[in-house]
Image: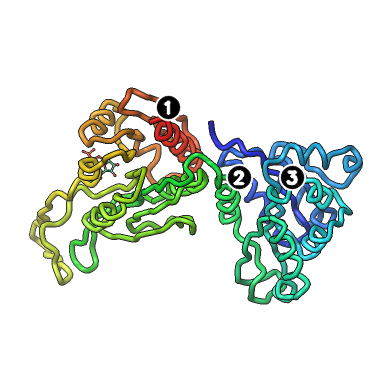
Amino acid sequence: MQNTYRILVGISGGIAAYKIPQLIRLLKKQGAQVKVVLTPNASGLVGEKALQTICGHPVFTDNASFYDMDHIRLSQWADVFLISPATANTIAKIAHGIADNLLTSLALSISESKIMIAPAMNSEMWEKKATNHNLQILKDRGYHILPVANGELACGVCGPGRMLEPQEITDHVFRYMASSSILKGKSVLISSGPTEEPIDPVRVITNKSSGKMGAALARAALYLGAKVTVVSGPASEPLPSAATVVKVQTAQQMNTALKEHFENSDICIMAAAVSDYRPLCFSETKIVREEKQKFTLALIPNPDILANLALNKGKRFLVGFSLESDGSEERAIAKMNRKGCDMIIFNRADQALGLDSTRVVILGCDGFREEVPTIDKNAAAGIILERIAQRCVSR
Ligand code: CTP
């Protein structure tokens, strides 16, 4: 079972409305059901048909259906009402109980604690006392107000007031909804990305890991309410801002950082693609090319981080990844047993490495097996985290 949260997205008339199809896509990728309500001012800024196609439901507007008790049915349906973008005008109306369109009527009929507001406006409006006062009223009443970003605004000015990016809003929504959920109070440690083993000042031994799976796992763990630490090798994939991030370069540095954080963790997931070997000697100066000579690089093995962590596992739940170039699940099971972990995620290099999607088989040391067909890495991470959480809780 994935996150089957029902999210009602309310779009008011800010230019940032054009980003909402992308936001809906991200919410749905996490398994949420999404319905949309548009204010009359937003209708001209984002296409109703596009929204309807992406969310898979009719879009609710003030036309006719407004009088058909939609606000009551929708308010009963929604686990959360996310108003994004929320203009200064809509914020003011909600703060003062004005219900002059479907969106503001919904705001009045849904419990304050279920309403999240992602403001978007120009800096002048954002800094006005009236706006501050209205936001304070909403905060005091238990509405959840998301921050705004600083940056270039539609009016050409730079400053505060920009709506958060869709990914950041998604992170806020799931984290907020997870605050009472299954991994609350648990610490999850995740290793992510490749490692780099320097040969000389300009060359390294590395691999094609993008860090996408590690970032997706971090997000999924945050969504389930966990406190998350990521030890990441050099990868460009952005990690969620709510996670504590420790950056490392080499396998040895990763080993040290993980050992340190392992002590205070309940769950550890080794998603990093650790370099198995490193050069025996590091050349302080750039190695010069010799036209007619063979060049041999001596390598020595790096520590097996996962196997070492397993030696002091205690009650922790330890998960490995097994990236294989062929289809052998037996190799993955043998690896799990050899390294002493509770679960291993089997995937194939050609179906996962550097891609946005993956196909995994979740294997438990107790014989558990679940095949997850090719899906987006965020969705796969959600399923993996739920399986881990279920097994941790039932131990
Ligand atoms: N791993 C590790 N330390 C290493 C190598 C791998 O902790 N030096 C971890 C990986 O993060 C992964 C698991 O061990 O969770 C399996 O990694 P994988 O590369 O599939 O297996 P290897 O142990 O490297 O064995 P092989 O390369 O022979 O398949």
Q: Which residue is mark 1?
A: 371
Splitting the image into four quadrants, where does ligand 1 fall? top left
Q: Secondary structure at mark 1?
A: strand
Does residue 371 appear to the left or right of 143 in the view shown?
A: left
Mark sitting on residue 27: 2
- Residue type, label 2: Leu
- Residue type, label 3: Val
Mark 3 touches mark 1? (CB < 8 Å)? no
Q: Secondary structure at mark 3?
A: strand
Q: Which residue is mark 3?
A: 36
Q: Is residue 86 visible?
A: yes
Query: Which numbered disc flags the more N-terminal residue, 2 or 3?
Result: 2
Q: Quadrant of residue 359?
A: top left
Categorize mark 1 by other alpha carbons within 10 Å: few (<14), some (14-19), many (20+).
Answer: few
Query: What residue is at 77 percent from the left and 47 percent from the top?
Result: 37
**Residue 184 against residue 292 in the figure, above or below:** above
Query: What residue is at 24 percent from the left and 33 percent from the top?
Result: 335
The one of 208 and 141 positioned closer to us in this rendering: 141
